[in-house]
């Protein structure tokens, strides 16, 4: 959940290692935009990803990947003083996800239903410890509908095919003119698609609150830090829970991403 609730008395899921990662102000801006994009994958795809060397970008099928999101079943949970470790299984493979503990915030994962046996959506960055891959989780939430499990599988397939073959042709467009996403300079299949949507003012398909958030963020002056959640709240109105849920949904869909911390966001275009 977005950190909006932290400013208004609600709970949220903390994420990211306190010892480094993409969210640190000092590291922001040095990575390409693709490092902040969000791509749906299966665990098998995550395990297939590789690095040329420990500091290199993660690659999948010769395409750079940034943040990843998976939907999986929690096979086991191990809680430690500094982090919680989840063994995740989606039927295509198994991988560990680690969520670092913020000692200043109460751990409400069990109350939220993030327990052994539950299905969850996990978003974060891919890391390596020794010869073992794991997901450094910045966002974990329980799955509320079985349809989201099926949707994620289809979404991962769609994103992969768009990278390989390009998006479906628009009316009147020649299929031969389509350039696969992997050959474009756009940040990701999502960000490229979002850019197309923005250019054609087609964010109207979003619910009213989500659309208002996107529209307000796009209207702000360019900034590496993005827009603070408090500014979004003042501009679009609504209660804390609604704003937080809307930001979570936009994060899940890859339409926005967090920047210097979990209170600042930018549109993924």
Image (cartoon, rainbow, N blue to C red):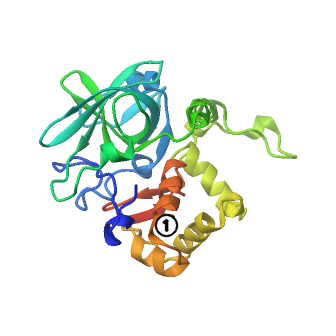
Q: Which residue is under mark 1?
A: 243
260 vs 2, left or right, is: left
Quarter of the picture holding the N terminus: bottom left
Q: Residue at x 38, y 66 (%)?
A: 4
Residue 67 x/y as whole percent: 41, 43
Q: Mark 1 Cα within 10 Å, few/some/many (few <14, many 20+)? A: many
Q: Quick one: which residue is furthest to the front in this view? A: 111
Residue 157 to residue 223: above or below: above
In which quadrant is the C terminus drawn?
bottom right
The image quarter in which residue 210 lies: bottom right
Residue 77 locus on image (x, y percent):
27, 30
The structure residue drawn at horizontal position 37% and vertical position 21%, both measured from the top left corner, is 94
- Residue 165 sits above or below residue 254 on the image: above
What residue lies at 44% left-to-right and 29% top-to-bottom?
Answer: 72
Q: Viewer-proximal residue, 241 or 177? A: 241
Q: Which residue is at the front of the view, 193 or 253? A: 253
Position in image of residue 115 (x %, y %): 34, 35
Residue occupying the point 22% across, 55% down: 106
Toward the bottom, the furthest residue is: 234
Frontmost residue, 60 versus 128? 128
Q: Residue furthest left?
A: 81
Q: Secondary structure at mark 1?
A: helix
Count numbered badges in the picture. 1
Residue 241, compared with residue 189, is above or below; it is: below
Asked whether, in this view, residue 26 is left or right of residue 199, the answer is left
């Amino acid at each position: 959940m977005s950190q909006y609730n932290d400013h208004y008395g609600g709970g949220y899921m903390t994420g990211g290692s306190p010892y480094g990662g993409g969210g640190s102000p000092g590291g922001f801006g040095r990575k390409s935009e693709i490092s902040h994009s969000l791509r749906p994958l299966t665990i098998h795809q995550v395990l297939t990803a590789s690095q040329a060397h420990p500091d290199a970008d993660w690659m999948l099928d010769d395409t750079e990947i940034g943040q990843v999101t998976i939907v999986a079943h929690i096979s086991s949970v191990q809680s430690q003083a500094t982090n919680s470790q989840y063994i995740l299984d989606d039927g295509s493979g198994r991988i560990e996800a680690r969520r670092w503990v913020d000692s200043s915030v109460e751990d409400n994962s069990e109350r939220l239903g993030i327990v052994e046996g539950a299905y969850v959506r996990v978003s974060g960055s891919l890391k390596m410890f020794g010869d073992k891959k794991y997901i450094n989780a910045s966002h974990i939430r329980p799955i509320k509908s079985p349809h989201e499990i099926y949707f994620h599988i289809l979404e991962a397939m769609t994103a992969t095919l768009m990278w390989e073959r390009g998006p479906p042709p628009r009316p009147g467009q020649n299929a031969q003119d389509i350039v696969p996403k992997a050959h474009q300079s756009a940040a990701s299949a999502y960000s490229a698609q979002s850019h197309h949507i923005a250019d054609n003012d087609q964010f109207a398909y979003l619910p009213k609150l989500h659309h208002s958030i996107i529209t307000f963020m796009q209207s702000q002056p360019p900034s590496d830090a993005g827009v603070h959640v408090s500014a979004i709240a003042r501009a679009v109105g609504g209660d804390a829970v609604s704003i937080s849920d809307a930001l979570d949904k936009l994060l899940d869909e890859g339409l926005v991403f967090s920047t210097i911390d979990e209170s600042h966001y930018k549109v993924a275009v």
